Image (spheres, helix red, strand yellow):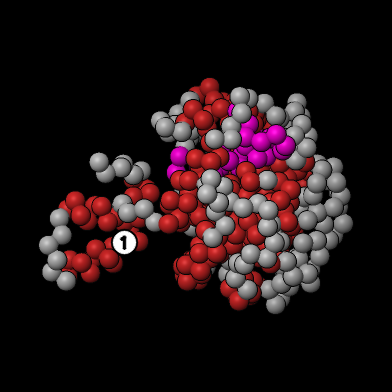
């Protein structure tokens, strides 16, 4: 039996394979409709990798709905978003119950002020990740009661993010975020999750002060050198893992035609993803999301070697190797596997961050 494929997923597979079908037809081969359909639905290496990785993630869920003993809110949110990115919403018949348990588990981690990073120790990193997941989940479950819980939690979470951005800061740090809601410092890595969370919240129709996102984009621009180097806390630094994030923020701020965007992309393309042991999965995720949105033609050229590099690190159990990445080693295989899936699923254009 030919497996069913969600319409949007099928469409993108079909578009990628149309040249192959055209060549078969023009060559005069007697190809049946069933043969063509089988060709269009053929599983690509990335699809197999995603399917195996998601099965691994689902196998880690605990009785309370979380998937990890440490940073449970943040890592459960990541595992849930990996499913969303692959085209499995909470209304999905097969995986919906798993997803809903995960979402409820994350909602239970929010404190009374709306902050997600306190109870699980993930700080503002986890808060931004949870906010992003809930924004993506809103309206996808076809469950009014769950939607209302998400909406209520999301409004509180956004208030925490906005208030943290409004803390008086130096000219260097204004517009960004760092580890705690009351800090006077900022860094681009942590700010990226807050920016994506606010952007996704806007996409689902909930209010976000425009000035907060405008200031966040300005903060990012201050960290980009004219030659395309991207800094973590100060301009002049050259952080490869942050290039894709910088591109994504520029797109969100409608700054993709700014000359520095092209220079960031050129630097990214000249120094492709490699297994260096330093934030490999973080970079893989943002390379995919940022480059595919800012420069889609360049992304298509970058994709084959990029996918080969990423897929080489999937383990037999479906997870992605967390031991060779300095950041993933501390966060564990839920982190590395979720980030890898979200990176590989960029081609499906399902989530707000992926859509051009």
Q: Quadrant of residue 13?
A: bottom left
Q: Is residue 353 visible?
A: no
Q: Is residue 96 visible?
A: yes
Q: Quadrant of residue 186?
A: bottom right
Residue 299 or 295: which is nearer the viewer? 299
How many marks do you count on the picture?
Answer: 1
Furthest residue toward top: 145
Please say if 248 is above or below 116: below
Residue 229 or 32: which is nearer the viewer? 32
Please say if 314 is above or below 26: above
Local crowd size for mark 1, using a 10 Å CA cut-off: few (<14), some (14–19), many (≥20): some
Residue 99 location (% of width, % of height):
52, 32
Residue under pointer 1: 17
> Residue at point 54% right, 35% down?
59
Tell me which segment is drawn in magenta.
Answer: 65-88
Work out which quarter of the rendered image holds the N terminus and state it. top left
Residue 284 location (% of width, % of height):
60, 59
Please say if 109 is above or below 229: above
Left or right: where does residue 325 sit relative to residue 29?
right
Residue 345 or 319: which is nearer the viewer? 319
Residue 178 or 310: which is nearer the viewer? 310
Q: Verify whether residue 82 appears in magenta.
A: yes
> Residue at point 15% right, 55% down?
32
Residue 184 location (% of width, % of height):
86, 49
Secondary structure of the residue carrying numbered label 1: helix
> Residue at point 78% right, 56% down?
187
Q: Verify whether residue 105 appears in magenta.
A: no
> Residue at point 29% right, 55% down?
40
Please say if 309 is above or below 327: below
Furthest residue toward front: 316
């Amino acid at each position: 039996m030919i497996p069913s494929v969600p319409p949007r997923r099928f469409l993108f597979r079909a578009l990628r394979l149309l040249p192959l079908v055209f060549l078969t037809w023009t060559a005069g081969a007697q190809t049946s409709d069933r043969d063509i359909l089988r060709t269009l639905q053929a599983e690509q290496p990335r699809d197999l990798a995603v399917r195996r990785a998601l099965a691994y993630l689902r196998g880690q869920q605990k009785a309370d709905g979380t998937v990890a003993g440490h940073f449970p809110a943040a890592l459960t949110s990541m595992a849930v978003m990996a499913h969303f990115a692959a085209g499995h919403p909470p209304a999905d018949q097969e995986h919906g119950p798993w997803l809903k348990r995960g979402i409820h588990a994350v909602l239970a981690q929010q404190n009374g002020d709306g902050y997600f990073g306190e109870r699980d120790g993930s700080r503002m990193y986890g808060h931004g990740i949870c906010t992003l997941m809930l924004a993506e989940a809103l309206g996808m479950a076809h469950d009014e009661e769950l939607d209302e819980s998400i909406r209520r939690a999301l409004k509180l979470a956004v208030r925490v993010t906005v208030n943290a951005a409004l803390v008086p800061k130096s000219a260097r740090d204004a517009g960004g975020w760092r580890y705690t809601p009351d800090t006077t410092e900022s860094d681009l890595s942590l700010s990226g999750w807050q920016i994506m969370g606010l952007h996704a919240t806007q996409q689902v129709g909930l209010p976000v002060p425009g000035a907060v996102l405008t200031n966040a984009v300005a903060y990012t621009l201050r960290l980009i050198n004219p030659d395309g180097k991207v800094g973590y806390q100060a301009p002049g630094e050259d952080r490869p893992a942050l290039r894709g994030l910088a591109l994504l923020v520029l797109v969100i701020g409608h700054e993709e035609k700014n000359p520095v965007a092209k220079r960031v992309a050129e630097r990214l393309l000249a120094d492709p993803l490699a297994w260096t042991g330093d934030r490999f999965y973080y970079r893989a995720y943002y390379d995919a999301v940022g480059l595919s949105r800012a420069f889609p033609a360049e992304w298509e050229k970058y994709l084959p070697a990029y996918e080969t590099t990423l897929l080489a690190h999937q383990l037999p159990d479906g997870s992605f190797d967390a031991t060779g990445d300095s950041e993933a080693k501390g966060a564990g295989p839920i982190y590395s596997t979720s980030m890898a899936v979200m990176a590989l699923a960029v081609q499906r254009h399902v989530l707000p961050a992926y859509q051009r």
